[in-house]
């Protein structure tokens, strides 16, 4: 048997609600502009263009409840999102089989260094420095489908220091969960452990150190994150 020449990195995990069990994270896919009102606020056409995706790193997941204000930015934004956790995957997954691959749902923040993302957009460069940085994906525990079913409607909202900033409904998603899974599987081989961050409703905006972010998705619960 071969030895590792360095210590392997730790498996990234997300807690399972009301349990000591853990969900091991493989990849994190994110969809852009999946709520029409958010597409409009970012200056884009809300028509049903083909979905587009980007990724965060699996170890960007953080369940500590604290978000350290990251370096190299002065404009970090919150984006509250429904998180879809896969228990299985494959390629070219049919639309009517897609939901059968879902283990459960959680909520997450797609924290974004907006100033850097905007610069990269202007120059036609990749978004990683705006999206895929340390602890850029705070997440709640995952609720299994066996407890919550599949979520096609329900309020998704975010408050900062008690003030409502983002509010939408899961039924406003331009691309539904099954469609996202099916579409992603045409480009990538999906697998158990993959997470999909499903886009954010309108109202994204900056946070500063000391802010307390409380996100919620009806049926799943709350996520509280303090910016430190
Ligand atoms: Mn997002």
Image: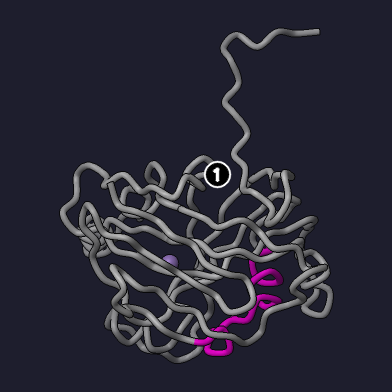
Q: Which quadrant: the N terminus?
A: top right
Judge: label 1 CB < 8 Å from ligand 1: no
Q: How many marks?
A: 1
44 displayed left or right of 87: left
Q: Which residue lies at the image location 80% right of the left edge and 74% below the top edge?
A: 94
Q: Nearer the viewer, residue 216 or 30?
A: 216
Where is residue 88 drawn, in percent x and y?
Answer: 80, 56
Q: Which residue lies at the image location 57% right of the left edge and 12% below the top edge?
A: 6
Residue range of the region highlighted in magenta in the rendering:
169-185
Secondary structure character of the magenta stretch overall: helix
Where is residue 181 drawn, in percent x and y?
Answer: 68, 69
Say which element carries label 1: helix
Check residue 173 for magenta coloring. yes
How crowded pointer 1 is (Cα within 10 Å; few <14, some 14-19, many 20+) is rated as many
Q: Which residue lies at the image location 50% right of the left edge and 72% below the top edge?
A: 216
207 displayed left or right of 170: left
Where is residue 120 drawn, in percent x and y?
Answer: 26, 57
55 displayed left or right of 3: left
Q: Which residue lies at the image location 51% right of the left edge and 40% below the top edge?
A: 59
Q: Nearer the viewer, residue 61 or 130?
A: 61
Find disc 1 in the rendering and name its residue: 58
In the rendered image, which quarter is residue 189 located in?
bottom right
In the rendered image, which quarter is residue 47 located in?
bottom left
Where is residue 149 drawn, in percent x and y?
Answer: 77, 76
């Amino acid at each position: 048997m071969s030895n590792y020449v360095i210590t392997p990195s730790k498996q990234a995990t997300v807690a399972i609600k009301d349990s000591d069990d853990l969900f091991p994270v493989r990849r994190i896919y994110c969809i852009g502009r999946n709520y029409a009102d958010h597409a409009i606020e970012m200056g884009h056409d809300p028509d049903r263009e083909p979905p587009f995706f980007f990724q965060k790193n699996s170890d960007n997941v953080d369940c500590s409840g604290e978000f350290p204000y990251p370096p190299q930015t002065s404009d970090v934004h919150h984006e509250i999102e429904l998180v879809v956790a896969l228990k299985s995957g494959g390629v070219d997954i049919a639309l009517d089989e897609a939901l059968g691959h879902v283990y459960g749902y959680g909520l997450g923040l797609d924290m974004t260094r907006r100033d850097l993302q905007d610069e990269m957009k202007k120059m036609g460069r990749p978004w990683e420095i705006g999206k895929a940085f340390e602890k850029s994906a705070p997440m709640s525990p995952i609720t299994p489908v066996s407890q919550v079913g599949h979520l096609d409607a329900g309020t998704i909202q975010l408050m900062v220091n008690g003030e409502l900033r983002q509010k939408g409904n899961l039924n406003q998603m331009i691309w539904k969960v099954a469609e996202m899974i099916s579409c992603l599987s045409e480009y990538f081989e999906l697998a158990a452990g993959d997470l999909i961050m499903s886009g954010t409703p309108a109202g994204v905006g900056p946070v500063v150190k000391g802010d307390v972010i409380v996100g919620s998705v009806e049926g799943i619960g709350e996520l509280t994150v303090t910016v430190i």
